[in-house]
Amino acid sequence: MTARISITVEVNGERVDAQVLPRLNLADFLREHLQLTGTHVGCEHGVCGACTVRVDGDIVRSCLMLAVQTHNASVQTIEGLSDSGEIADLQTAFRDRNALQCGFCTPGMLMAAQDLLKQQPEPDREQIRQHLSGNYCRCTGYQAIVDAIETTARVRMGGRP
């Protein structure tokens, strides 16, 4: 039997002490151990973006990261960004622009969109598409998603929706 490893991690601002198996990925830790099911598991190969979270301020694919790698780190999930109000305007724009569809990709899209807008407050449509290129959506065709992010950027810069 494989020994468990003790980790301490801050998840959405709260300290979590846990005993985890060495090969448990971060996505499964968040979903199964902490019941933070907004982090979706799609491809399990890091290419779809559905499992995107922030670790120490950088977005990562949680299906490719082991939970033990987050020891002494800060992890933010879609629940944390939503509960804090950090992405309220993005969520509203996604709803208003019909960028949600089935919703499976939405948490990862919102995480990636917020990451882009923090790095580059006024991205053009091509920069938005480029930043989202690692996030798959099978429903919207991306047009509405790009519209929502572009609208949010414009409003954040003091413009009109």
Image (spheres, grey):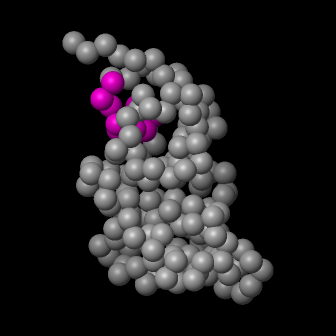
Q: Is residue 147 magenta?
A: no
In the image, is residue 147 above or below residue 11?
Answer: below
Q: Quadrant of the C terminus?
A: bottom right
- Horizontal side of 54 relative to 41 (left or right) equals right
**81 left or right, relative to 133:** right
Tally the marks. Answer: 0
Give the vertical position of 158 relative to 45 (above or below): below
User: Residue at (40%, 45%) from the top-left corner?
Assistant: 62
Which region shows up in magenta? 22-34
**Residue 95 visible in the snapshot:** no
Residue 7 image point, x, y percent = 48, 22
Residue that appears at 38% across and 23% down: 20
Residue 152, given in percent of the width and then of the height, sits at 63, 76
Quadrant in which the N terminus is drawn:
top left
Q: Is residue 67 visible?
A: yes
Looking at the picture, does residue 161 appear above or below residue 33? below
Q: Quadrant of residue 108?
A: bottom left
Looking at the image, residue 159 sits to the left or right of residue 22; the answer is right
Q: Please, which residue is most extreme toward the bottom here?
A: 160
Identify the image quadrant of residue 132: bottom left
Q: Is residue 28 magenta?
A: yes
- Give percent across and percent down for residue 68: 42, 28
